[in-house]
Image (spheres, helix red, strand yellow):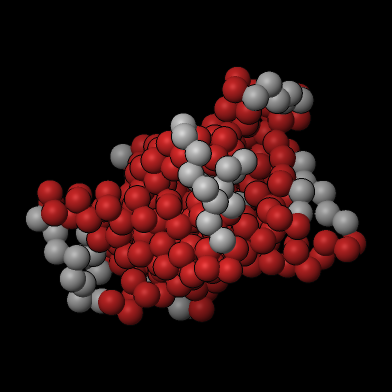
C-alpha cells in the first residue's frame, strides 16, 4: 500500500506540473506558490473538519521545522529552475532520494548498528539505480558560470530530504496526515504572499485563471498521498518510488507537448521502474523498521 501512495503522489505532482506549465504564462512563480498553498489550506482544513481532526497540534515546533525546511527547499528549487537548465534543476532536486539513503545508513552506522546498515545496502543500491535512471531521462548539463546555482539546486534536494524525513517523524508521533499537510500549506501561503509584495500580482485573465484551481487541488492531494507514504511506509522504499514522477512527467511531455524521448530516456524509465520493483521486493527481506528511521 505504501508503494501505491507514493506512485499516486508522483502522478498528482506530475499532473500539477502540466497545469503549472499552462498557468506560468499568466502568473509569476510566487503567485503560483501562494495560490497553491491557499487552496491547499482550504482543502486540508475541510478534510480535517470532515475527519474530526483538530488543527491544534501537540508538536507545533515539529510542524514549524517541516514547513520551514520544505518552503526553503521549494524556493531553492525555483531559484535553480530560473538559473539552470530545467533538466539539471530537476535532477539536483531529485537527489533527495540519495540524501535520504545517506542519512538513514549514516544514522544507522552512528548508532553502532553495522549489521543493520549492511542489510539496508541492497535497498540503497536500488535508490542509486533509480537516480541513475533520472539522469538518463533528463541528461543534465551545467556551465562553469552556473556553479552557484548548482549548489543552490543541490541544497534544494538536501532540504527536500530533510522535509521528507520530518514528515516520517511526524507520522511516528501520531500526527494525522491532513494536519501535517495543512501546516505545510500555511507555510507556502505565507512565503508566497510575502514574496508577492515585492514581485507584484498579475491581473486575473479568464479562463487562464482557472488553472490555479487544479494546481492547488493536485498539490494538496499529492502532498497528502506523499505524507501517507512517508508516514506509513519504509523511508528508503518511498524515496525510491518518488522517481516515478519523472516517468509520468516524461510521458506527459510525449503525449501532450510532442517531446521526443530518445532511446536512453526509455532505458532510464525502465531502470526507474525496475529499481522500484526491486526495492519493494528487497524491503520485505530487509529490516522491518530501520533503527535510523525510528531515531
Residue 106 visible from this viewpoint: yes
x, y percent for residue 148: 78, 68
At which x and y percent is residue 131? 64, 47
Which residue occupies 44% across, 42% down? 212
The vertical placement of 1 against 197, above or below, is above
Q: Does 159 sit above or below residue 288?
A: below
In the picture, which quadrant includes the N terminus?
top left
- x%, y% of residue 180? 30, 62
| Residue at the right extreme, as displayed | 144
Residue 95 in which image quadrant: bottom right
The residue positioned 18% from the left and 55% from the top of the image is 48
Please state the horizontal and vertical placement of residue 68, each as a whole percent of the image: 45, 72
Residue 167 occupies which quadrant of the picture?
Answer: bottom left
The answer to whether any part of residue 293 appears in the image is: no
Please state, as top left, top right, bottom left or bottom right, where the C terminus lies in the image.
bottom left
Number of labelled discs? 0
Amino acid at each position: 500500500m505504501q508503494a501505491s501512495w507514493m506512485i499516486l503522489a508522483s502522478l498528482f505532482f506530475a499532473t500539477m506540473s502540466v497545469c503549472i506549465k499552462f498557468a506560468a504564462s499568466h502568473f509569476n512563480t510566487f503567485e503560483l506558490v501562494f495560490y497553491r498553498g491557499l487552496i491547499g489550506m482550504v482543502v486540508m482544513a475541510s478534510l480535517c473538519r470532515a475527519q474530526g481532526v483538530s488543527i491544534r497540534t501537540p508538536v507545533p515546533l515539529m510542524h514549524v521545522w517541516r514547513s520551514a525546511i520544505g518552503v526553503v527547499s521549494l524556493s531553492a528549487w525555483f531559484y535553480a529552475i530560473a538559473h539552470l537548465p530545467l533538466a539539471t534543476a530537476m535532477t539536483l532536486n531529485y537527489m533527495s532520494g540519495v540524501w535520504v539513503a545517506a542519512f538513514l545508513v549514516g544514522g544507522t552506522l552512528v548508532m553502532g548498528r553495522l549489521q543493520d546498515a549492511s542489510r539496508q545496502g541492497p535497498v540503497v543500491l536500488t535508490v542509486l539505480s533509480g537516480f541513475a535512471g533520472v539522469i538518463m531521462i533528463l541528461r543534465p548539463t551545467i556551465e562553469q558560470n552556473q556553479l552557484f546555482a548548482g549548489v543552490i539546486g543541490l541544497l534544494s534536494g538536501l532540504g527536500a530530504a530533510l522535509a521528507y524525513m520530518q514528515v516520517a517523524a511526524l507520522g511516528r508521533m501520531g500526527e494525522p496526515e491532513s494536519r501535517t499537510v495543512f501546516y505545510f500549506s500555511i507555510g507556502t501561503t505565507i512565503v508566497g504572499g510575502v514574496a508577492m509584495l515585492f514581485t507584484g500580482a498579475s491581473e486575473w485573465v479568464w479562463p487562464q485563471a482557472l488553472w490555479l484551481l487544479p494546481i492547488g487541488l493536485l498539490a494538496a492531494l499529492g502532498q497528502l498521498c506523499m505524507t501517507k507514504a512517508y508516514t506509513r511506509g519504509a523511508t528508503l522504499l518511498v524515496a525510491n518510488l518518488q522517481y516515478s514522477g519523472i516517468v509520468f512527467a516524461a510521458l506527459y511531455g510525449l503525449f501532450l507537448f510532442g517531446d521526443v524521448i530518445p532511446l536512453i530516456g526509455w532505458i532510464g524509465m525502465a531502470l526507474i521502474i525496475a529499481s522500484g520493483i526491486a526495492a519493494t521486493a528487497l524491503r520485505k527481506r530487509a529490516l522491518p523498521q530501520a533503527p535510523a528511521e525510528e531515531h
